């Protein structure tokens, strides 16, 4: 066998590198479309199988044991294919029952891998929640693990729940985006702090776990700094935490209060926001937004305090210890069973 000599590469001609970048992009996009097409076909097949099972059980009175028989017969007919275990067939039936409208399967959940749909089916109880998380997963390209984390932490249920004056203080559509950017409560259980932790302890821990805090804050937040120094009239002031929101194009001042919300807290936050607008904000940036994180709040008091405040800000609570989760698990088989099967393990 003749030894193949390495090709001596010469300097590429003019325009070659740009062409190569374009080719790589087209190949990558084609690979993605091919993967999505295969995924849509697989999810569509599973939906049709699940729909057939449902219809025959209802119309012809077939019992649950037909799924055992079908699993055996399909695996015998297609020994090279994974996914025809009894457990996965039960998920197909649940999938078809959850989405009776084929249009939703084609336009929304059909764009997600089957593993994502298993999480939606096993972790959420109703179609409205499932569709909301499915659309967000598609929009942000969440992995299955990230989807699972966001569901367990009730991300969408907490979004837009902070008490704010954004509608009165910001123009549309910025006010809507700003409102959706804030949550209530913020879950900070990853800090490992007791519920009586002080403000500086929380601040220090947040900086040490800034990646997880950014994940909790949500898409668009970029960390600027902590204890950011501002000099006003010869006096020194320090902002707890300063962020920049890439979609809102504005700075976000976050102040932490270890106790219950008091109206006077907003005076300090408003002062810091004024200083940031005067000394840090660029001309093209939108007005600075403030977020006051407190251990607890009286909703009516918070609404009254914000009503007459001229600056856009919100008030939300934080949780330092994990609250007891609701039992979201359904009666369907565990996802681990399906994973084992699709990975080639024993699926009997």
Image (cartoon, rainbow, N blue to C red):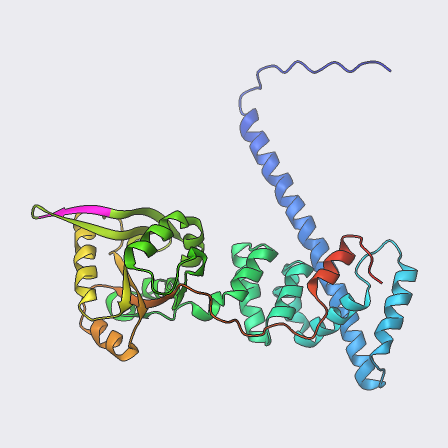
Image spot of residue 21 (x, y percent): 56, 33
Residue at 88%, 61% in the rendered image: 75
Horizontal side of residue 78 vs 150, given as left or right? right
Q: 199 left or right of 14?
A: left
The magenta stretch spans residue 230 = yes
- Residue sitting farthest toward the left: 233
Question: Range of the magenta residues?
Answer: 228-232
Q: Quadrant of the N terminus?
A: top right
Tell me the residue at 21%/56% (across/down): 273
What's the residue at 82%, 64% (across, down)?
A: 85
Q: Position of residue 81 (x, y in %)?
A: 83, 56
Q: Is residue 39 left or right of residue 281?
A: right
**Compared to 121, does 64 lie above or below?**
below
In the image, residue 304 lies at what x, y percent?
Answer: 22, 77
Give percent across and percent down for residue 135. 55, 64
Magenta segment main secondary structure? strand
Q: Quadrant of the C terminus?
A: bottom right
The residue at 80%/54% (across/down) is 345
Q: Does residue 253 appear in this view?
A: no
Left of 120 or right of it: where is 179?
left
């Amino acid at each position: 066998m003749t030894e193949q000599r390495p090709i001596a590469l010469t300097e590429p001609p003019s325009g070659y590198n740009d062409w190569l970048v374009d080719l790589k992009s087209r190949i990558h996009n084609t690979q993605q479309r091919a993967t999505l097409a295969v995924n849509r076909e697989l999810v569509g097949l599973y939906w049709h199988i699940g729909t057939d099972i449902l219809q025959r059980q209802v119309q012809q009175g077939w019992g649950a044991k037909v799924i055992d028989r079908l699993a055996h017969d399909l695996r015998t007919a297609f020994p090279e294919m994974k996914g025809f275990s009894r457990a996965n067939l039960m998920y197909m039936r649940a999938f078809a029952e959850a989405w009776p409208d084929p249009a939703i399967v084609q336009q929304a959940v059909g764009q997600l891998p089957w593993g994502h749909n298993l999480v939606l089916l096993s972790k959420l109880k109703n179609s409205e929640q499932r569709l909301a998380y499915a659309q967000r997963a598609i929009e942000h390209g969440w992995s299955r693990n990230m989807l699972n984390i966001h569901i367990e932490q009730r991300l969408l249920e907490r979004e837009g729940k902070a008490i704010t004056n954004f509608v009165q203080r910001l123009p549309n559509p910025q006010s809507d985006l700003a409102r959706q950017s804030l949550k209530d409560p913020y879950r900070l259980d990853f800090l490992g702090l007791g519920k009586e932790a002080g403000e500086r302890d929380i601040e220090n821990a947040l900086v040490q776990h800034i990646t997880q805090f950014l994940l909790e804050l949500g898409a668009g937040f970029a960390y600027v700094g902590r204890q950011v120094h501002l000099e006003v009239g010869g006096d020194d002031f320090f902002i707890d935490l300063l962020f920049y929101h890439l979609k809102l194009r504005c700075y976000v001042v976050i102040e932490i209060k270890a106790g219950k919300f008091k109206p006077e807290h907003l005076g300090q936050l408003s002062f810091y926001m004024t200083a940031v607008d005067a000394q840090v904000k660029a001309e093209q940036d939108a007005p600075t937004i403030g977020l006051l994180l407190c251990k607890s709040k009286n909703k009516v008091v918070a609404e009254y305090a914000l009503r007459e405040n001229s600056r856009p800000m919100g008030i939300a609570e934080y949780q330092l210890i994990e609250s007891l989760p609701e039992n979201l698990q359904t009666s369907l088989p565990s996802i681990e069973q399906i994973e084992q099967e699709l990975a080639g393990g024993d699926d009997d």
